[in-house]
Image (cartoon, rainbow, N blue to C red):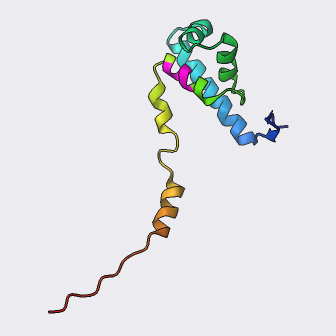
Amino acid sequence: MSKTTMGTRMPRKLETHLQTVGEQIKLARLRRNLSVAQVAERATCSPLTVGRIEKGTPTVAIGIYLRVLYALQLEDDILLLAQKDELGRTLQDLGLKHRERASKKS
C-alpha cells in the first residue's frame, strides 16, 4: 500500500520516482567518494536526512534536496524539472486566438 504524507496517499508512480531520484543522488555521492556524513555536513542537515533522501522518503522537504544537490555540485539539475512541458505547450497553443487582418485596400 502507498505511504502516507500528511494524511494523503502517495501514488505508487510518485513513490517510484522518489526512489529513483534517491538512487541517483546516492550514486552521485558514491561517484564523488563522499560519505553520507560528509554530504550531510556540507548540506547542513543530518546524516539521517541524507539517508532518507537516498531511500526516496516522501517527507523530506524540497529545500533539503536542493542543499544536498548543492553539496554534490548538482544544483543546476533542479532547473530541468518541467522544462519540456509538452502537454502545457500544446494546451497553450490550442488556446491562442489567431487574429485575422483585413486585406489592404488601395
Secondary structure mostly seen in magenta is helix
Q: Which quarter of the rendering shows the C terminus? A: bottom left
Q: Position of residue 20 (x, y in %)?
A: 64, 30
Please state the total of marks drawn on the protein image: 0
Tell me the residue at 57%/8% (across/down). Answer: 41
The correct choice, above or below, for 15 with respect to 54 in the image is below
The correct choice, above or below, for 89 with respect to 97 in the image is above
Task: Name the image quarter holding residue 57.
Answer: top right
Tell me the residue at 64%/17% (across/down). Answer: 50
Left/right placement of residue 9 relative to residue 96 reads right
- The front one of 70 and 14 is 70
User: Residue farthest to the left?
Assistant: 106
The correct choice, above or below, for 56 with respect to 50 in the image is below
The correct choice, above or below, for 43 with respect to 4 in the image is above
Q: Which quarter of the rendering shows the N terminus? A: top right
Tell me the residue at 45%/19% (across/down). Answer: 73
- The front one of 81 and 1 is 81
Q: Is residue 69 magenta?
A: yes
Q: Position of residue 49 (x, y in %)?
A: 68, 17
Query: What residue span does the magenta drawing correspond to?
Result: 66-70
Task: Name the image quarter holding residue 35.
Answer: top right
Left/right placement of residue 104 relative to residue 19 reads left
User: Residue farthest to the bottom?
Assistant: 106
Q: Position of residue 2 (x, y in %)?
A: 81, 37
User: Residue farthest to the right?
Assistant: 1
Q: Is residue 63 magenta?
A: no
